[in-house]
Amino acid sequence: FAVGAGTSGNVVANRLTESPHTKVLVLEAGDNDAPNIFISTPLLAPLVQGTTTDWMYRTEPQENACNLLTDNVSFWPRGKVIGGSSCMHFMWYVRGHKDDFDSWEKSGATGWGYKDVLGYFKKSENAMNKNMTSKFHGKDGPLKTSYPYHNQLADIFVEAGKELGYNHTDYNAENMIGFNLPQQTLYNGQRESSSTSFLRPVIKKRRDRLHIVGRAHVRQVVFEENKKGNKRATGVIFVKDGVEIKVRARKEVIFSGGSVGTPQLLMLSGIGPRKHLEEMGIDVIADMPGVGQNLQDHLQIPATFIATNLTKDATVDERTVNAYIQVYFTSLIYIYIPDIQLVLLSHKWTTSTTEKFQKMLNFKQEVSWSMNIDGYLLLYVDRLNKWGTEHNTATLSDFLVYSCLLRPASVGYLKLRSNNYQDHPIIQPNYLSNKRDVETLIEVIEQLEKTKHFKEIGAKMEIGTVNCGNTTSPRSDEFYECMSRALTMTIYHPVGTAKMGSENDIKAVVDSRLKVYKVDGLRVADASVMPTIPSANTQAACYMIGEKAADMIKQDWKL
């Protein structure tokens, strides 16, 4: 069984059923990913959030961050759909630095160093751009990667990076430190998800052995005691359309529920910290203190810039977005558009727009499925970036730059809210609880305006909307700290809640072959096993984990 048809789970299901003698049942709480124009259309990715394809998790109130969000609570979108979060993120394909994975191995994850995992990154990939370094990219995998369309503003960012002393580099190759356009799981104007890449191309040919059940919410694992007295996972109980169903696994159960779903299901099944399980009224199968601990997430701080010397086509305005959506909906011709994190804000920001900026950060969750094309455009622009009040598009362009904290020192946890599988767990990321994270963000934000290329386009940070008070100087460290704590946003990369490590690591949940300690027949293959968060978007590493997990399962069962 694969519990969860997400980024890693679909890779496992695909690779295991390459053998005509292996049957896999995939259980997914969400529904089918197609047809869904919001998933397939890259520009509409934000509209997937807050719908039935989103788990719509929320964090606990943050003591040290998210001050401009309602009640200091951060939204945590996660994919509840066949394809998981690969159906709703922004498609960046970034593997991370080699030291990220070498540190995994040093921490006890034997066989997970960079030299061990590089081949699995390449195995998934079908690099479609000749400028990608061939030695480090795959050409035969199911997952297409490419560079997006770009324009003057993107080039300015790359040149500004050069001015700071960084190379123009293929960051997924050997020289990983530098500036470049994002490599994305995007081809011919459409999203490449784990569903479109690993399931759809094979599902018809493998009907006899690859079975996928949607709207199947697993509530617990079934354990039986074997002859040696060990607890073994022999199946699961899931609920579909209000009916409870119990199924047995001949070989093993594989969790791919992600960094929220996997630890929640482990604890609901009796694997976790004994005291917490007993408080929840759950029988303890295995006392494992590390389940739900070690929660790490990337966060970002958006800064608004006003640029007075940009050419007219350097950013994306409403007409560009409207043309894109009109063409896509009426003819399904795939045209390119710049990455949405560099979207033009074609309004001037003023000190009176703090409330509107707060609404943008809180990201309204209502979606009207009956809106016409102009309605889609309006909702998209309203949600992401159209909060100002003064038009002046002839003389200025506004854009956002996100400062992203890739190696956070702040660590959080996840706990059950109740023993009901339908209740969302308690999510406490502890954003910016470690002072080192704030110091890093201050250093980054201070550099943004200082490069020659930013000066050439007349780029100035607009600081009036941050609402950090009159007692701090606009360019002081105190101001930037206030800004960081006010504008904190997740980048949707939670990891580490079922940590991989050695047997003598009390916080380790799985071993180097991804088998859950203290029980038999249960394995985890998703972002929750990462010992530390890579300095990159996490989807590439999730594909890699799925590939490596499938190989290990084949080896262990001689498939």
Image (cartoon, helix red, strand yellow):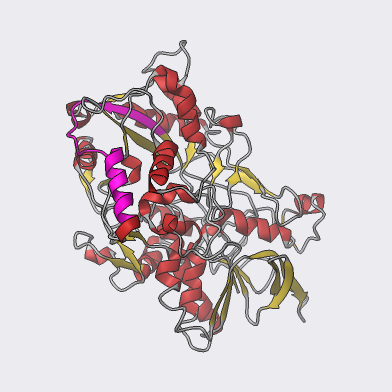
Residue drawn at 48 percent across, 51 percent down? 48
User: What residue do we see at 24% from left, 39% from top?
Assistant: 157
Where are the magenta residues, as a range? 302-328
Q: Please, is residue 25 above or below residue 375 in the view?
A: below
Name which quarter of the figure residue 87 lies in.
Answer: bottom left
Query: x and y percent of residue 417 in the render?
Result: 72, 47
- Find out whether residue 437 is within the magenta segment: no
Q: Which residue is nearer to you in this view: 384 or 92?
A: 384
Image location (x, y in percent) of residue 102: 42, 57
Q: Is residue 527 found left or right of 345 in the rendered image?
A: right
Please state the horizontal and vertical placement of residue 120, each as a whole percent of the image: 39, 68
Residue 48 is left or right of residue 115, and the answer is right
Image quadrant where residue 113 sits: bottom left
Residue drawn at x 59%, y 68% as measured from the top left: 214
Judge whether 118 appears above or below 169 on screen: below
Identified at 46% across, 77% down, the residue is: 15
Q: How many marks?
A: 0
Q: In the image, is residue 310 part of the stretch drawn in magenta?
A: yes
Viewed as shown, does residue 77 lie left or right of 264? left
Q: Quadrant of residue 123?
A: bottom left
Q: 511 or 399: which is nearer to us? A: 399
Q: Quadrant of the N terminus?
A: bottom right
